[in-house]
Structures are given as C-alpha cells and as structure tokens.
Image: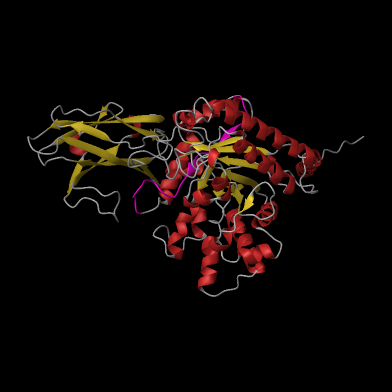
Amino acid sequence: MTIRIPSPRFLGLALTALIVLTSGRWAGSAEIDPVSRPVRLMINWDEQGMWMSQLQQRRKHKQPLDAASVRRVIQTALDEHARAGFDRLAYCAWVRFESPVPGFKTCDFDKGIHTRAPGFQALHEAGDNQLAILLKRCRRNQMQFLVCLRMNDRHGVARTAKFYVENPGLRLEEFPGGLDFKHEKVRDGVLAFIREVLELYDIDGIELDYLRWCHMFRTDEAVQNAPLLTEMTRKARAIIDAAARKRGRSKLLLSVRVPQTLAECHRLGFDVKTWIKEGLVDYVCPSDFFFSDFNMRVDRFVSLCKGTACRIYPAIHPLVQVNFPENITPANYRALARSYYAAGAAGIATYNYQYNWRRWTGGTRGLVDGWPKTLRWMTQLRDPKALAARDRHYLFYPLWQNRSPSGAVKYDRCVINRKSGTADGDLRLRLYENDAGVPRTLSMQFRALGLEDADRLTVAVNGNRVPTDSIRRTFDRDGLAADEGRPCGPFHLHEFPLRHDWLRPGDNSLAVSLAKRSDKGAAEIVVWEIEIRVKPRR
C-alpha cells in the first residue's frame, strides 16, 4: 500500500483551519480573535485628535461635513493607521466622567465634541458614533481596538465638568479639576462605565490612562491608598473576564499607562508590581507625561513581568522637552525604539501623535503635510533588527524645567563648581550601542555654559578618558534663542568621536570635570543637552 504524505502547503492550510476552529471568536465571525494576534505598534488617541485636523480642513475649504462625509474621514484615518502597520488602537471614550460618545447611561455626554470635531453633531444625529465606526474598521483591518479611560484628566474644562461641579466633596483640592479616588463613589463610577461599554460594544479591552493627570490621591495619602486602586483593578479585571466569557471570547485585555519610573508609580499609589504579578493587567505603557525619554529604564518594568504573560510597550512622544520648538525626527524615533527593544519591550506605543501635523491647521509644530505621512515614521520601528542599519540620534535632554506633572524632578544636568573643579555627579546615558559586530561611527556632543576661553574640561565615558585633542570646542556667543531650542546664554559646544568599546548595554556614565580653570567666569558650569549620533557604515 502506498502512503501519500500531505504537501507542506496542505498541512499549513489544515493547521490554519484548526486554529480558526479552536480559537475564540468575535461578533459571530470565524476569524482569529484579535486579542490573540501579536502586537508590535500601538497608538493611543484622545477624544478628537485622530481626525480633528482633517475635519477642520474640510470646514475651512467648505467641503461637506454631513454624517457620511465624517464617517469616511474616520474610516480613512483608521485605514491609514493600518497601512502604517499599527496593530492596536486605544480610543479615549471616557474622561472627567463624561464621554464624547453618546448613548451611555453611566456618564454624561460631552457635547463639546460637536465643537472640537466639526461634523460630529451630524454624525451623532444620524444615529452613528465614532466608537462604533472605529471598532468596525479595526475589525476590517485586523487591528485590536481598546477603549481608553483618562483616569483623572485635569485640562481646563475639568473644573466645569458636571460630575465635578455637582460633587464638591469628591474633589482633589490639592489638584483642582481632579477627583479623589479614595472615595468609593469615584472608583465605582469608573467600574460602572467599564461594565457598560463592554456590554454595548464587542471591544478588545480597556486601557486605564493614569498619565492624565497622574494624581489620584492627595500626595500625603497616595502610598497608603494604593490598595484602593489595586482593589479597583481587581474588580475591573473581573468585569472584563466576565464580559469575555459572555461573548465566548478567550480573553479581553486590561492595560495601564503609568509614569516611566517605578519610583513615581510608588509615590502616586500605582502598585504596578502587584498588578503584574496577580495577572490583573495584560500590558503596561510606561511613559513621561508629555515627552520622549531617552533615559527610560524599560528593563525595570520588563523584570516585573518575568514569569507572567504581561508585556511592556514604552511610549514615544513627538516632543522631547519643555520649550523645545521642534518635534523629534525619524532618527530620534529609531534611537528610542532601539533602546526600548534592547531593554525587553514587546513593542512600541505612541501618544499625542497629532503634534506631527499641527502646522497643517495653523499650529507651530510638526509638518504642514504631516498627515498621514508621518505615521510611516512608526512603520520603521516594527522590525527591531532593521533599526541597526539606519541612522540613530539620541537626545539626553532635561525633560522638564523643574518638576513634571507627576511631581518628579526630571531636569538632568551636570553642575561643576568652579572653585573645586568637581561636578555634582555623573550624567546617566541609556544606550545599547556597544555591539562590535556592526560597522558604524558614533559621536557625542554637549553644551557647557559658564566656561571662559582659558577653561578646559576633562571628559570620561564609563571611566574612559576622551583624548583632549579629539574634542572640538566651538563657542556660541549668542546662545540659543527660543526658535533654536531651550533658550540659554553663551555656551561652548563640545563634540568628539565615541568608541563603541567604551560603552556598555544599559546605563552609561558621562563624567565631566574642570581640568584647567581661569579666575574669571561663572561660579558654576552647567553641562547639559547631550546628543549621540550613530551612523552605520554602508
């Protein structure tokens, strides 16, 4: 008897069919549940940022803003994300105990969306809404779709939000516009919306955005009240799991966006370690409030996930520091992604991406033609290995002037005492550029304020002294104006080649001291705004 062995193609088709038949299903379809798909790129959108510019342009040019036209704008926007390679989209459908989506019983409808997003009134009056459109379009494009809750948003309108006005006893007086999550009524309101949105829409999960606005409790009560947020997270997990069972789905997701350091999370009452270890959250997005942090210690979050199914998606923002006039470039995106992947990130998240095309509608940031082409800047981040072949540009800048909205100081710089010649400490630089097997050139630069012509600095990287004759020093008498960077007075720019064998994976140190000094000059010399450029040799 002849035994016929099935061809590899037949076996592949059979395996695919088996996966489809045995996997969870959604909305009556036989396709693979979106939650089971791998995710490399994800994006979080507020109530209107994804389409506001497009709608404003239509109004400016007197183009139709009827329900059908607005629906097409939303659909096209989502399609552009899919073409750029995004796997997951989170849309903010709850903020300040209001929703920009009509029809919910557990929160008020934010009518302001009709002003911020031209044409949305016509869309809603036609019986349609942006959440339903996004969900359907994500299904078509095989993307995950989550509903995001901005947990304590304190934009200016927060002080006039109905729930805030009607519940003065629930307010977080230390942070006007915020609510105090020590009150059960506040936490229950969050859970009620989660339950309702899961009942009404077959979404893929919930994202809790704690970055808006970081503080859930009084600063002197946050640590002791952390168990209240953890218990709320347990209840949210139970609600989400029950919704998955009800819909016949294997799993629905719960995620959190939190500050980029575990110290901040602890001070604010976010017990991320427990959330991960108990399996309460499926992924975590560590992030600064507003800026891209090239020094983020992603590995510390990754280490918490060992032995769990939780994954880490650090966030990249279009902006790099307060008062800096321009957005980061594709080379900056590649540098950030290389570090994040090397530290163990499962993928890359992004936030406030509309800043990349703000000039289109008269803003001061981004590109006039930035929509939708700047979405492709994220496309290049899908493949961690491919990043090694592209230029990378690291910016180790002070993120905030003093304190960030979380309350943490994020103002990295080195201050040298002229009298003693010593610095107040080394600067930490997060890098994974020590691989000797990849031909490339590396260079470093920094600005030094307060030097005199006769002064000379000693520079060392991880204890390796940079040869003095390799340092090019340029004096900028005019300093930086507001349109050039963070404003500052006259400075000396120091530039020198960087050797890969000086570097180590992860934290690297830059030590600067005053080797030769004059009797003149400022009492303190400030070294800051370190940049590292990596150029592969082709």
The residue at the far left in this view is: 519
User: What is the chief secondary structure element of the magenta stretch?
Assistant: loop
Q: Is residue 309 visible?
A: no
* Vertical order, 249 against 225 (above or below): below
Spot occupied by residue 460 in the image (x, y as percentages of width and height)? 25, 30
Q: Which residue is located at x 48 percent, y 34 percent?
A: 342
Q: Which residue is located at x 64 percent, y 60 percent?
A: 75
Which of the two residues, 258 or 215, is positioned nearer the viewer here? 215
Which of the two residues, 458 or 211, is positioned nearer the viewer here? 211
Task: Tell me where the magenta segment starts and ends, as one range.
Answer: 307-325
Spot occupied by residue 459 in the image (x, y as percentages of width and height)? 23, 32
Q: Quadrant of residue 363?
A: bottom left
* Vertical order, 521 against 425 (above or below): below
Q: Is residue 184 left or right of residue 501?
A: right
Based on the picture, tell me whether residue 314 belongs to the magenta stretch. Answer: yes
Spot occupied by residue 256 in the image (x, y as percentages of width and height)? 57, 37
Q: Quadrant of residue 438?
A: top left
Q: Is residue 342 left or right of residue 441?
A: right
Spot occupied by residue 32 in the image (x, y as percentages of width and height)? 74, 44
> Quarter holding the N terminus?
top right
The residue at the far bottom in this view is: 62
Q: Quadrant of residue 274?
A: top right
The type of colouring in the image is: secondary structure
Number of numbered discs present?
0
Based on the picture, tell me whether residue 365 belongs to the magenta stretch. Answer: no
Q: Is residue 396 visible?
A: yes
